[in-house]
Image (cartoon, helix red, strand yellow):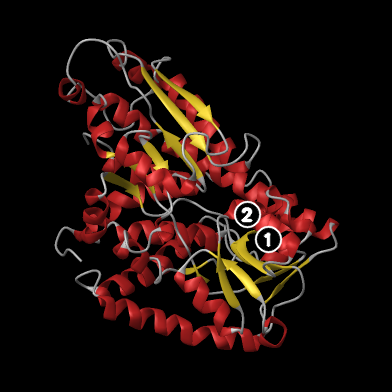
Amino acid sequence: MRKGGGGRRRSRLLVAGASVAGLLVLAACGGGSGSGSNEEKAESKGVQVGATKDAYIAAFADVDPVQLTAQSINAPEHYYSQGLQAYADALKEWSGGKITVNLQFAAAVAPPAEADAALADGRLDIAAFFPSYATQKYPVYNGLNTIGFGMDDPLAGLLAWDLSLNDSLAAIPELQEEMKKQGIHLLLPSNLSDVTAMGCTSDRSSPAKAKGGIARTAGVLENAYIEAIGMSPASMPFTEVFEALQRGTVDCTLTALAQAKASGYLDIAKFWAVGKDRPAVMHPLAFSEARWKSLPLVAQQLLWDRLDVLYEAQLRSVLAATSDALKGLGAAGGTVSSFSEDAVAAFQPVKQQAYDAFKASGVVADTDGAIKLVQDNRDKWLGIASGAGLSGVEFEQFAGWYAEHNDVDLAPVVEQVRANILAPLRPGA
């Protein structure tokens, strides 16, 4: 881990992570037409931090139109897609119509497993992708993916997990270097994602009930966790999970409740178990290095600055979707409960084994420092969430809490993102 300037590097990558949410993909295709080289455009004059909409529109007056294609791996009505739509609308409005976004859904440009290749070969310019599908290709990323623990609750835990990972991983230069070798400019190591739980076709919340079952997982650490309670892991794209649950090929899936509702799992997987200090499997948002450098500075700045709109819309959509999922689960006769005490006890050695394996891997220069950084930043962001009044809500209480707070004030969190993350790290700042 880099010392000295590490604090600034840490805040640099936290930017995008706090701001961009969940399982969606932005792809910028084409770009502006007109005279001038890409280098000349990229060196064009930008605007100051905190620029007004009028100032942005004026700055775009002489800029060639920029056409972007945005892709969500989900349907248009999905909660992640709603955040992307809000972002697209803000970009068009603030650029005076010079940035337009063509929204594509259901992974129409590239399937999730090919999104990184699409970044490298130019089919996509910005995309969420899944390094867990290619562990040998991304050893640093997947190693770091084994030391993030969190998701204590569907509100403060969600925020602390996402923000602490982005805050921490920005300080690890090996991560950026690994991505650049693949033709990828990493914007954030962790997209905002909703809280993961284990949904099953029968109650598997204890080792006695879990033994012999099969669970679909999304990473090495999740494999170890379900093995600790006597289950076997199965790897498959999330698009195949519904049929696997329906046919009995798998008994459980580790996924987000809101994603499960959107995918129709709740009518089959009615028994959900949640627990504190669980592994947090992340996936990044990245940009094609060549494409980003070709954009005019003012376009880069607007894409960066209006991540606050995307973040707030995404977070609000995730909270609403989680509440809807819990209500849908209840309507389907399902339940959500905590893992049993003996299950929690079985999980604890896995966490230490993950730390030990990470230290032995040597994928980064300072493995001890990386672990401490993640832990410290998690505590820091839990404090920020608590200070904003967004703590103390458990899964079992969340639907009722949200019914009374569906207009929850997210301004304190968004302001932290805007002032302390976006502003200091914006292009040309």
Asked if the residue under mark 1 is in contact with the one under mark 2, i.e. CB atoms within 8 Å, the reply is yes
Which residue is painted at 25% across and 70% down in the image? 363
Q: Is residue 420 visible?
A: no
Q: Is residue 110 above or below residue 258?
A: above
Left or right of residue 160, residue 58 in this image: left
Tell me where residue 184 appears, x and y as whole percent. Answer: 28, 45
The vertical placement of 211 against 115, above or below, is: below
**What's the residue type where badge 2 is placed?**
Glu
Left or right: 130 as drawn, with respect to 410:
left
At a point 42% along the width and 46% down the height, the residue shown is 114
Amino acid carrying mark 1 in the image = Ala
Q: Tell me if residue 284 can be seen.
A: yes
Q: Quadrant of the N terminus?
A: bottom left
Numbered disc total: 2
Q: How many other residues sit within 10 Å of disc 1, few (<14), some (14-19) or many (≥20)?
A: some
Residue at figure coordinates x 57%, y 58% from the top left: 390
Horizontal side, residue 281 vs residue 169: left or right: right
Q: Is residue 128 above or below residue 124?
A: below
Q: CA distance from mark 2 to mark 1?
A: 6 Å
**Which residue is tagged 2?**
240
Task: Tell me if 129 is positioned left or right of 200 in this view.
Answer: left
Label 2: how many Cα within 10 Å (few below 14, some 14–19, many 20+): few
Front one among 203 and 13: 203
Where residue 5 appears, as percent x and y from the top left, is 16, 58
In terms of image quadrants, where is residue 400? bottom right
**Residue 398 numbered tag:** none
